Amino acid sequence: MPQLAPDPDAAALARDPGALAARLCEAHPEAAASPDAVRVVFAPGRVNLIGEHTDYNEGFVLPVAIDLGIAIALVPTDDGIARLTLAETGETRQFAVAAPGARRGSWVDYAAGMGWAMAGAGLPVTGFRGLLASDLPQGAGLSSSAALEVASAWALAGGERPPTEPMRLVHLVQRGENGYIGLNNGIMDQFASVFGEAGCALLLDCRSLEHRAIALPVDGLALVACHSGSPRRLEASAYNERRAQCEAAVAAIAAIEPGVAALRDVTPAMLEAVRGRLGDVAARRAQHVVDEDRRVLDTVAALGAGDLAEVGRLFYASHASLRDLYEVSSPELDALVAIARATPGVVGARLTGAGFGGCTINLVRRDAVPALREAVLRDYPARTGLAPRVFEVEASAGARRLA
Ligand code: GLA
């Protein structure tokens, strides 16, 4: 297999489709033989403003697709083999697109899982030679997996046009994650990666699948992700466990309230009435989800009314609930939120994504971004012994063909 030298500036290639296509031709002779057939596709990562661990409870989420993501330059082939090279390391992995076989325990599983899910759903999949470049930090809770899956789905469909209808793609990605990767996650991450809109957050009702773009007050406000630099501990098992605890809570509540099919259906009054029958853990998990759904709708209303103080209050309440009731925060994420909260000009801060490490999302007055960056870089290492990373991100469009 051709070997490509690692590229120290691979992240820049994610933004430069011409250069990525040229590098593909160096890596794979099939691309060099037909450079006009090369396509470049891109899928973004996301931050979630609020609505954490609500998606698989059929509730509400408010994610934002960001301007960091994964690009794949590819040329389709007719051999049924996807051979994909990582620009950053030069490593090449391959799989049979329609029958990828067992997981390998590497990044390529996310691409292979899409072949498995798409072929399983009867969608045509093509072999390809590809080169992948990413400027999205991995394992940071910014949905690098969803970005890789969505970009891979485009590549497996030839790169010319979207692989299928957008909401069907969202569900195929979930099928790949649940059935191939083994993470029982919801639909928020890939929904954001597919449906992203510049300058907007996306309010999604995870039951009806209705969604609408919520314009962000772009003028004075910035979105800042702070990466804790801590590995996401026990993520898959703890995540699947949370989901199972929510299902157990639903079963216990439904025994008394037969109309309840998901935590989405539980009102605060109902929860009070059945609390004694739920174990302590189930009651706390359910309380988080019931309150968090409300907070999403309240955040949308507060953004609409320009009430940033209320948005901030909701962000901090969400974080506290994830820490105390849902128990998915970490001392590092708590430290980042505390530092942000003490910084004038920060509207709100909370952990974003699954938790267990990864990033916080901060809504910050633009002129206060340098102060937040400084405070995090100064205080966080002293509190945790870890090196943080601070990224200002922009609300951006969803997956698309770049060339
Ligand atoms: C991960 C999952 C999502 C969602 C979040 C928590 O990002 O992939 O489906 O459940 O955690 O809100």
Image (tube, rainbow, N blue to C red):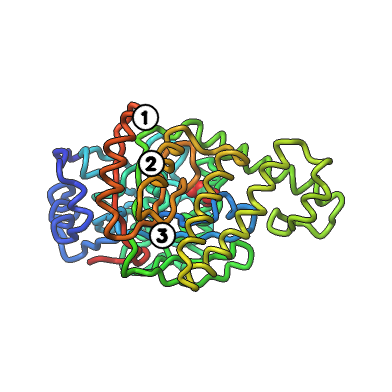
Mark 1 vs mark 3: which is more N-terminal?
Answer: 3
For residue 16, above or below residue 252: below
Q: Residue 37 sits in which quadrant?
A: bottom left
Can you say which quadrant of the picture contains the C terminus? bottom left
> Which disc is residue 169 wearing?
none
Element at label 3: helix
Q: Position of residue 159 (x, y in %)?
A: 31, 63
Residue type at the position of mark 1: Arg
Residue at far top of view: 385
Q: Any atom of ligand 1 within 8 Å of the CB at mark 1?
A: no
Q: Are marks 1 and 2 in contact (CB under 8 Å)?
A: yes
Residue type at the position of mark 3: Ser
Q: CA distance from mark 1 to mark 3?
A: 34 Å
Mark 1 vs mark 2: which is more N-terminal?
Answer: 2
- Residue marked by disc 1: 383
How crowded pointer 2 is (Cα within 10 Å; few <14, some 14-19, many 20+) is rated as: some
How crowded pointer 3 is (Cα within 10 Å; few <14, some 14-19, many 20+) is rated as: many
> Which disc is residue 193 wearing?
3
